[in-house]
Image (cartoon, rainbow, N blue to C red):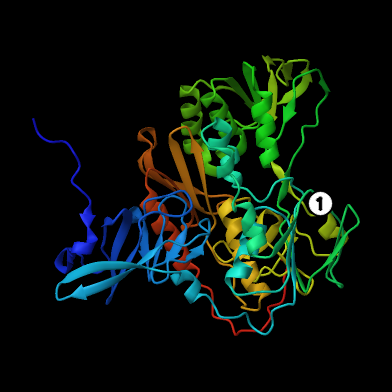
Amino acid sequence: MADSKAPPPIDLTRGFPLQQLPDGAMVAGRVGDDEVLLVHRGDAFFAVGAHCTHYHGPLADGLLVGDTIRCPWHHACFDLRSGEAVRAPALDPIDCWRVERVDDVVYVREKVADTAGARRRARPPSAAPESVVIIGGGGAGLAAADMLRREGFDGPVTMISADDAPPCDRPNLSKDYLAGEAKDDWIPLRPPEFYKDHHIDLVLKARVSSLDVKKGSVEIDRGTTYKGGALLIATGAEPVRLNIPVDGAAPIRYLRTFADSRAIIASVQGAKQVLVVGASFIGLEVAASLRARGLAVHVVAPERLPLERVMGAEVGRLIKQVHEEHGVVFHLGTTASRIDGRKAVLSDGTTVDADVVVAGIGVRPAVAFAEKAGLTIDRGVAVNEFLETSAPNVFAAGDVARWPDPHTGQRIRVEHWVVAERQGQVAARNILGWRERFHAVPFFWSRHYDMSINYVGHAETWDKVDIDGRLEDRDCAVRYLKDGHELAVVTISRDHVSLEAELEMEHAAEPPSSAPGVPTSLRYD
């Protein structure tokens, strides 16, 4: 009988033949107990940690771009020379090892200490403010605070958050955590000591009551005022509430925060059937997670197919089929009219038993205090390509911001986690005076049972859909085009294609160079 065991991992300390590692090639191996990726790029060789620090994605399946490597799962990007996480969703660096070439053999030697820290800019530009106040405790706010410190800013940083918990891994709240497959301590983006060690004043359970952009001051509902030389608005969005008569005991839940996810979990203890109102990404991920807990799940939504508006009929049919295969019952083309006790009455007269109702019918950007402060509002807080608002030294990032997207030529606002974090990082650098345009291609991922969907680009409308592969095999790339221009790409089981599509879109909209310190006016179309 043949031995079916996998071959032992390559010991990279014993050397690897150069002829087996052409330029642009990667090989995975080990150095002691560590999994290491050896990379040949031009005249240089790099040895770095083999897994992304975000969700442990295999970097060997990623994409090399210059002296960086991008994770195949969620498109985090790392500097091969330093290991630094240069683009979210990863925030922590990967390890680096010293590489030595002897004749035609490449050897991986000892681990190099704190290469990411050594490559950080020594100090911010002279334009940096004395202090920064960040309004919002989500991905954009945390990424900004983290980047301020990584860039060497040592002035006071205050984060004001309406949540009762520190910034958390929000995408997980509707996925693994809600399904019971992730522990509580996996959810915070940073451990409690991070804020103390990095001198970040994190103010929780605080809502902004007023904002004075001229004075750079923020007053919260408990009466305290915070002043900053620069302000970042990263308040995100708030769930749209059901506006229907409710008479009875079935709790209605929404999902935005860590507390919301825990409340849903508590509500379904002992429940048998849940009604999800809304076939949004959140609604469908909640449906999948609650099915994983063994609950009967019904989904009601006005659409003909789930997510058809975002990804078209073809992908919508597949998503519906996947959920139905897992026992979800859809009530499409109708809405919830009222809740009577533990029974939901739909607009078509159908009734659905529900021990718990979870609503996922969309969100609205949290702009009330920004609008009251006189900032320009355009279905969100309007910003320019540097993420500057209409007021000096006031920036906005994340779900709340509408920015000029170079890829579509339109002003857009998207509710994507990775975009929020990347905008937070760029906003932080611009607060310090680096004058960096935000031109990242929008990206998000969604998981439905064992099927993951990656989406790059932004297509609000399209006139053609090209499908490479077979949707029914759940192995395909779906391209959305308008007037022959590719706007977005959806991939299933084709992570490398997703990375390549992202890179192609970046090259198609390369931003022009800008002179440092030269402001760009805020224009509204």
Which residue corresponds to the image point at 74% horizontal and 56% vertical from the top-left? 380
Q: How many marks?
A: 1
User: Residue 230 location, x and y as percent?
Assistant: 75, 72
- Residue underneath mark 1: 206
- Regarding residue 509, the answer to whether it shows in the image is yes
Is residue 453 or residue 236 the one in the foreground?
236
Is residue 22 or residue 199 the one in the foreground?
199
Is the C terminus in the top left, top right, bottom left or bottom right quadrant?
A: bottom right
177 shown above or below 213: above
User: Residue 167 location, x and y as percent?
Assistant: 65, 51
The image quarter containing residue 115 is bottom left
Residue 10 lies left or right of residue 310; in this view the side is left
Which residue corresponds to the image point at 59% horizontal and 37% vertical from the top-left? 174
User: Residue 509 location, x and y as percent?
Assistant: 50, 68
Is residue 216 or residue 389 the one in the foreground?
216
255 shown above or below 211: above
Which residue corresponds to the image point at 74% horizontal and 17% vertical from the top-left? 345
Amino acid type indicated by mark 1: Ala
User: Residue 437 location, x and y as percent?
Assistant: 59, 72
Q: Dot 1: what SS?
A: loop
The image quarter containing residue 94 is bottom left
Is the N terminus in the top left, top right, bottom left or bottom right quadrant?
A: top left
The image quarter containing residue 254 is top right
Is residue 477 or residue 409 the one in the foreground?
477
Residue 140 lies left or right of residue 497; in this view the side is right
- Regarding residue 480, the answer to whether it shows in the image is no
286 shown above or below 35: above
